[in-house]
Image (cartoon, rainbow, N blue to C red):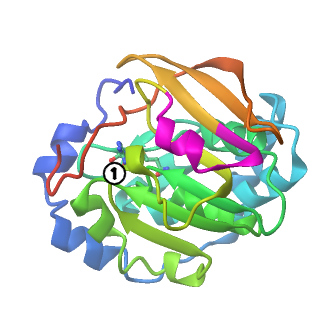
Amino acid sequence: MKIEPGELSPEFLEKSAFHPYICSMLNSVPREDTYLQKGIRKQLVQSLRVKGIRDERVLAAIEAVPRHFFLDPAFERQAYEDRAFPIFAGQTISQPFTVAYQTQLLEIKKFDKVLEIGTGSAYQAIVLAELGVSVFSIERQKTLYDHISNFFFLKKFPTIKRFYGDGFEGLPSYAPFDKILITCGAPFIPPKLIEQLKPGGIMVIPVGGDRVQKMLRVTKDATGKVYEEYMGDFEFVPMLTGKSVNQF
Ligand code: SAH
């Protein structure tokens, strides 16, 4: 993501008072969702509509989830701008448009079983849970995984199960999944994730190099044959192999 002059860089956030311990204490404290914030969120949803998000259920889910809960209180102002934002441990909370777009591509049905790769702040996982699905979400960074363990808002969503692990492996013991969503830039489509997709299922995955990836919608038909559709260029943080206890 681009940092504008005068903004706080991820490096600054990392080295400042945003110590893991302090951050997780902060996000265990319930926050308020004021009329003002609800109003600004409505405007964000309207801007997503203008940018081409048509699925009203997805828009309603974005409207229902207070994105400012996922950012440090100091950055509430930025929560409803349609842009990615550094969260913690060098990672980002995805841009609202990207969250809405990927969710729309998944053609979610109530009670779907969804595997998400890259839990991050859990914003996307909660948007999915709002749509009535059960979410299995994997995060490879221990600091991020631990960071949201006491997150007050996440506790309201018992249909989200989190795992510390490597997304390239998926979750074979919980497979198959109706839908699979990858929220980091993958170098290729992980074969194990294709295996874990149900016949008739949909996977949404950004595939490509470090900077730009092609959003692909991968569908598996009833016979197990796999089709790919190109859905535009996007920028994600990279999907990395293996688990990590610290930032890298
Ligand atoms: N869905 C998140 C976006 C997080 S950014 C949100 O709504 O906030 C992408 C995340 O993918 C990062 O947290 C990163 O650590 C994670 N990630 C990268 N490679 C991964 C892998 N192989 N397995 C699981 N998570 C991975």
Relative to 58, residue 204 above or below: above
- Residue 159 in the magenta stretch? The answer is no
Foreground residue among 10 and 98: 98
Residue 192 drawn in magenta: yes
Amino acid, disc 1: Asp
- Looking at the image, residue 237 lies above or below residue 124: above
Give the residue drawn at x 61%, y 72%.
33
Q: Residue 70, image x and y in percent? A: 46, 61
Quadrant location of residue 209? top left
Q: Position of residue 115 (x, y in %)?
A: 57, 56
Residue at position x 75%, y 38% from top? Answer: 105
Q: Tell me: is circle 1 under 8 Å from ligand 1.
A: yes
> Which residue is situated farthest in the left direction here?
15
Q: Closer to the camera, 92 or 184?
A: 184
Q: Is residue 67 visible?
A: no
133 and 169: which is toward the camera: 169
Among the 4 quarters of the image, the one containing residue 245:
bottom left
The residue identified by callout 1 is 166
Using residue 142 as the reference point, say whether residue 219 is left or right of it: right
**CA neighbours of label 1 inside 10 A, class few (<14), some (14 to 19), many (20+):** many
How many numbered marks, from 0 up? 1
Provide the secondary structure element on which disc 1 rests: loop
Q: In the picture, which quadrant includes the N terminus?
A: top left
Figure quadrant of residue 27: bottom left
- Residue at the image point whose x is 29% and y is 60% from the top: 144
The residue range painted magenta reads 189-203
Q: Would residue 148 be visible to someone looking at this image?
A: yes
Residue 78 x/y as whole percent: 48, 46
